[in-house]
Amino acid sequence: MMTPQPGRFIALDGIDGSGKSSQVGPLVEWLRSRGHAVTTCRDPGSTATGDAIRGILLDRHDLQLAATAEMFLYMAARAQLVAEVVGPALARGEWVVSDRYLLANIVYQGHAGGLDPDTIRAVGEIATGGLMPDLVLLLDVDLETASRRLDRPLDKLENRGDDYRQRLRSGYLAEAAAAPDRIVVIDATARPDEVTARIRAAVTARFKELG
């Protein structure tokens, strides 16, 4: 009997308007075309618990959360995501592609929100049981490009203004510079098909089974 191949875990991240969510579908289709079973998810969300928490975090404009409370809600949603979706899929030998993961908390509530990034990292280790992506694709765009792409009603985090968003971008780039073996920066200012090609190249370079 053949031994199942180990699952692989990829997360896409970046500031709002970077186009990361739009790139999940093309990446998943490409991986499936290469013969891999793929599970997709979004963080927070993809479970009943996670979706309920997502509504509190992003849609309840009447609720003003302290940064620490906000961080713990994200962690609760992520713990459920790992238990219900990510962990079981990887155990089955599937690939997992997630729209955001722990890096988002480290940047949003840490670098931009005033909490200590290393403390968030430590809490994240507990919430996820140490389950981290094999590769994080950081889609990077300037604020002007991101603003043009956000042609819809903004959620609570997107409404925090340009100073906050600049801290987000700087935080993401700082995290990528500190962990180049795990976080690959993708220039996402180009046309969507060009960004898709760059993502495929980065994934192929990281995982020898796709070469």
Image (tube, helix red, strand yellow):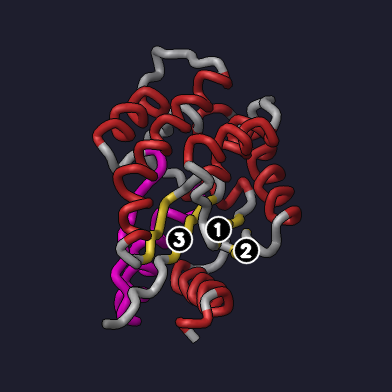
72, above or below 39, in the image: above
Q: Amino acid at mark 1?
A: Val
The residue to which callout 2 is attached is: 184
Q: Residue at x 35, y 37 (%)?
A: 80
6, above or below 12, in the image: below
The residue to which callout 3 is attached is: 9
- Cα–Cα span, label 1 and label 2: 6 Å
In contact (CB < 8 Å): disc 1 and disc 3: no
User: Residue 71 at what x, y percent from top left?
Assistant: 53, 27
Which secondary structure lies at badge 1?
strand
What number is the disc on residue 118?
none
First along the sequence among labels 1 and 2: 1
60, above or below 176, in the image: above
Instruction: Name the one closer to the observer, 170 or 152.
Output: 170
What number is the disc on residue 136?
1
Instruction: Name the one closer to the observer, 105 or 37.
Output: 37
User: Residue 190 at what x, y percent from top left?
Assistant: 55, 67
First along the sequence among labels 3 and 2: 3
First along the sequence among labels 1 and 3: 3
Which secondary structure lies at badge 3?
strand
- At label 3, counting other C-alpha atoms closer than 10 Å, the crowd grade (few under 14, some 14-19, many 20 or more) is many
Q: Amino acid at mark 2?
A: Val
Q: In the image, is residue 25 part of the stretch drawn in magenta?
A: yes
Which secondary structure lies at badge 2?
strand
Mark 1 vs mark 3: give the one in front.
Answer: 3
Magenta highlight range = 17-44
- Cα–Cα span, label 3 and label 2: 14 Å
Q: Residue furthest front?
A: 1
In contact (CB < 8 Å): disc 3 and disc 2: no
